[in-house]
Image: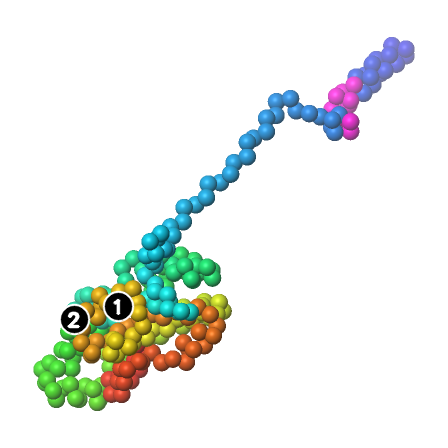
Amino acid sequence: FDENNLRGKQWYQRRVRAAKDDAPPSYDVTVNFQPTDYEPRPSVTPEPQHVVPTVTQGGLRLDKAYVDGNRINIDFEKHGCCPWEIVGLPDDCERYVPQELASRGISQSQWEEWCDDLMKNQKKAPSISGCLCLFCFPGLFVQCILCAMLCPISGNHPLKFLPCCYGDWHHGLDKWQQKVNKVLNPLDMHAKLKTYKPHGNAPKTLNKSTRVAGKDENYEFGILVIALNADESRKLMMEPWCNGVNDGCTSGFGRFM
């Protein structure tokens, strides 16, 4: 009996020692624990991203915008000479968001999307040679009068997609302007595409002198105007797109620019 009792006592002591080895460290040991091999990592400051300025030191605006009081004016050529010539915004206009818009929260990606959508719609724009053929060939003066009086080529109707109609282009301009103003209006800004005839009455843009060189008074000067505050936006909303065009013919019904 004594020998069994001794063995039981030894077994009990071994169990107690094993339990102590597996137990978590005491509170004092845990609190006062200091790692000996720890080296603090040096703080890393992220490098600032390079931002391309939209205005050079010499005052040249890379964003193609001309400041006109509380508005900015951007050139917009409506029609090319030939059907395969795509015109519209100035070259590289999409690369630089105007600084007046960027300061109000318009991002570069948003600006690129707007410019890209507008230029895609320009693929539907009529050309000068196409309009001459439509109105004057082969019937010349008689055909010109009949088309102007009877053909709603600019209207938003079910046949606007036909090659002889430009309603899909005008309708696309309307949709584009509505899309842009859904973003700009809550920021107290407003955008509008406008046409001036004669071009002498048009406001100044960066490329106006180049665009009107050699043009007579029948040239329709297109422009994208963006108002930069609430008062100017309300004024721009009330202004018509037409400034001297006065196209009252049936062929002009539905024109947006």
- Res. 204 image quadrant: bottom left
Residue 202 visible in image? yes
**Residue wearing tag 2:** 214
**Residue wearing tag 1:** 208
Q: Look at the image and give the residue range highlighted in magenta.
A: 17-28
- Res. 212 image quadrant: bottom left
Q: Quadrant where the C terminus lies?
A: bottom left
**Residue farthest to the front, as pictured:** 58
Q: Nearer the viewer, residue 155 or 46?
A: 46
**Residue farthest to the top, as pictured:** 3
Does 59 appear above or below 177?
A: above
Q: Are marks 2 and 1 in contact (CB under 8 Å)?
A: no
User: Mark 1, residues whose alpha carbon is within 10 Å: few (<14), some, or many (≥20)?
Assistant: some
- Residue 40, x across and y down, in percent: 59, 29
Q: Nearer the viewer, residue 105 or 32?
A: 105
Asked whether, in this view, residue 39 is left or right of residue 160, the answer is: right
Q: Residue at x 34, y 73 (%)?
A: 193
For numbered disc 2, what is the local secondary structure?
Answer: loop
Does 188 appear above or below 217?
A: above
**Residue farthest to the right, as pictured:** 1
Q: Nearer the viewer, residue 175 or 221?
A: 221
Q: Amino acid at mark 1?
A: Lys
Asked whether, in this view, residue 148 is left or right of residue 141, the answer is: right
Principal secondary structure, stretch drawn in magenta? helix
- Residue 137, x across and y down, in percent: 11, 81
Q: Residue at x 74, y 26 (%)?
A: 32
- Residue 213, x across and y down, in percent: 19, 69
159 in the magenta segment = no
For numbered disc 1, what is the local secondary structure?
Answer: helix
